[in-house]
Amino acid sequence: MSHQAAKLEALVKQKGNNTAKKTRFIAITSGKGGVGKSTISSNMAHIMAKNGLKVGIFDADIGLANLDVMFNVKITKNILHVLRGEASVEDILVPIEKNLVLIPGESGEEIFKYASSGLFERFMDEAHILDDLDVMIIDTGAGIGEHIQLFLRACDDVVVVTVPDPAAITDAYATIKVTSRLRNEISVIMNQVRNEKEALGLFEKIQKVALANIGNQLRLNYLGQISSDPKVVMSVKKRALFTREFPTSLPASELEVIVKRLAKKMERNVLVSPQESGLGGFFKRLMEHF
Ligand SMILES: Nc1ncnc2c1ncn2[C@@H]1O[C@H](COP(=O)(O)OP(=O)(O)OP(=O)(O)O)[C@@H](O)[C@H]1O
Ligand SMILES: [Mg+2]
């Protein structure tokens, strides 16, 4: 363990031995960009919040048009302001609706620059106000960069999103391959498909290649598909959530199936020590491998 990580661990250990709710961290990632990560993350968060889960959504790829656009909010400060001591965690949180809060993030690359500063400790302290979340969805950037991999390693679930075009499938496979070094289960969502049959056919192809090249220690989990639908395009253009605008549409019901499958995985309400819970616990895990 590096000196920095040891310091952080000592810090979080001071928090005492009470138990806290375990927040489930779900990373939404992709090989190729523009395949629907932010569309899926934001709508997934909305469905979960509507169903009574306390949801945080962390934009790890801010700066490009992402979750701020999806939720139609203006972001002035992000996690870097907290790390620089210019804002408190509370200051940067953007309430979206009941049970849903947006945490404007930054790429791992930027965050790690502050790992050794004393201000990081203050951030860890303040992050405890988010310990109450049931789930934190992390919208990562696309690609197989080192810092994205650190996010994927620290999460409980990794969901790779892809679309049917061959370049996207190739890149999704590359992400799966790199990520399989860190974990033995990866979930896949097929987005912008014509129908379930096409989605399953493509998933099986990915699975076959993975089995041949990575081996059977990797469990590839089919989470579901979302059909290509102009209602999704229209909603994004209007900066609205398609699951709110068109709750009975096919893509909305398909995303509900996906959320149900994810929820099943998080059914056990685990209690953990506070140092493992919440955003603070997440950053601790993130830093352990830095
Ligand atoms: N199911 C769908 N049907 C039709 N269009 C879709 C669907 N999902 C996403 N799109 C379209 O794809 C575009 C890109 O989606 P999104 O911004 O969510 O991708 P991303 O993976 O987050 O991109 P980036 O890598 O740039 O962050 C959206 O503007 C939307 O129009
Ligand atoms: Mg995005």
Image: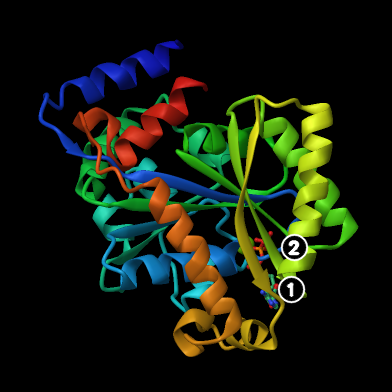
In the rendered image, the residue lying farthest to the right is 166
Can see residue 78?
A: no
> Which residue bears the numbered disc 2?
199
- The amino acid pointed to by label 1 is Asn
User: How far across and how far down the image is residue 285, in percent?
Assistant: 41, 28
- Mark 2: which secondary structure? helix
Whether residue 220 sits left or right of residue 47 in the image: it is right
Q: Specify the label residue 99 is tagged with.
A: none
**Residue at 25% from the left image edge and 49% from the top image edge:** 130
**Residue at 79% from the left image edge and 66% from the top image edge:** 198
Whether residue 77 sits left or right of residue 272 in the image: it is right
Q: Is residue 264 shown above or below 18? A: below
Q: Name which quarter of the figure residue 206 lies in.
A: top right
Q: Dot 1: within a 10 Å radius of its alpha carbon, few (fewer than 14), some, or many (20 or more) residues?
A: some
Whether residue 7 sits left or right of residue 203 in the image: it is left
- The amino acid pointed to by label 2 is Ala
Whether residue 77 sits left or right of residue 172 in the image: it is left
> Which residue bears the numbered disc 1?
195
Q: Is residue 155 shown above or below 285? A: below
Q: Name which quarter of the figure residue 99 lies in.
A: bottom left
Q: Quadrant of ligand 2?
A: bottom right
